[in-house]
Image (cartoon, rainbow, N blue to C red):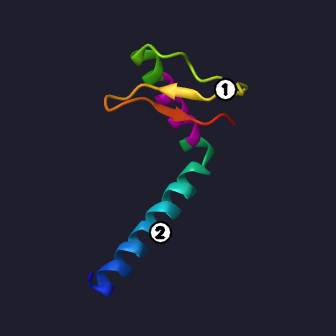
Amino acid sequence: MPDLDRVIGSALVKNAAVQFVNAALSNAVVRQRLDDLATAWLAASGAAELDDNTEAPAVLPFPGGNVQVPAK
């Protein structure tokens, strides 16, 4: 049985990480930089650029297999 303190500590760290990522993504500058990075990565990988107005999900190529990003 896992040590309760370790389980609670792990949950707190995960929660803090999620809150940090959510706060970063709410920042317009960070969002724009991530969008620029994703666009550059897609161009380098030969994939089509993501269209913000598309209703179809995007499929991103990864070495371990493709990842499907849901449509907005």
Q: Say what amino acid the circle numbered 2 marks.
A: Asn
Element marked by disc 1: loop
Above or below, comparing residue 24 to residue 54 in the picture: below
Instruction: From the top left corner, tell me how far across and down residue 65 is, in percent.
Output: 37, 30
Q: Residues within 10 Å of mark 2 (few under 14, many from 20)?
A: few
The majority secondary structure of the magenta stretch comes to helix
Q: Nearer the viewer, residue 29 or 1?
A: 1
| Residue for badge 2 | 15
Tag 2 secondary structure: helix
Q: Which mark is residue 3?
A: none
User: At 56% from the left edge and 57% from the top edge, which residue is drawn?
Assistant: 23
Q: Is residue 51 left or right of residue 67?
A: right
Location of residue 53 (image quadrant) = top right
Count every numbered label the image shows and give the total.
2
At a point 47% along the width and 69% down the height, the residue shown is 15
Q: Position of residue 50 (x, y in %)?
A: 59, 24
Q: Please report the bounds of the magenta region as a residue range.
A: 31-39
Task: Give the mark nearest the N terminus, 2 or 1.
Answer: 2
Q: Is residue 70 above or below residue 52?
A: below
Q: Distance between the Cα atoms at labels 2 and 1?
A: 31 Å
Residue of label 1: 56
Residue at image coords 35%, 73%: 10
Above or below — where is 62 with respect to 9?
Answer: above
* Rendered position, 2 above or below 33: below
Residue 3 located left or right of residue 14: left
User: Which kind of residue does numbered mark 1 sit on?
Assistant: Ala
Q: Position of residue 72 (x, y in %)?
A: 69, 37
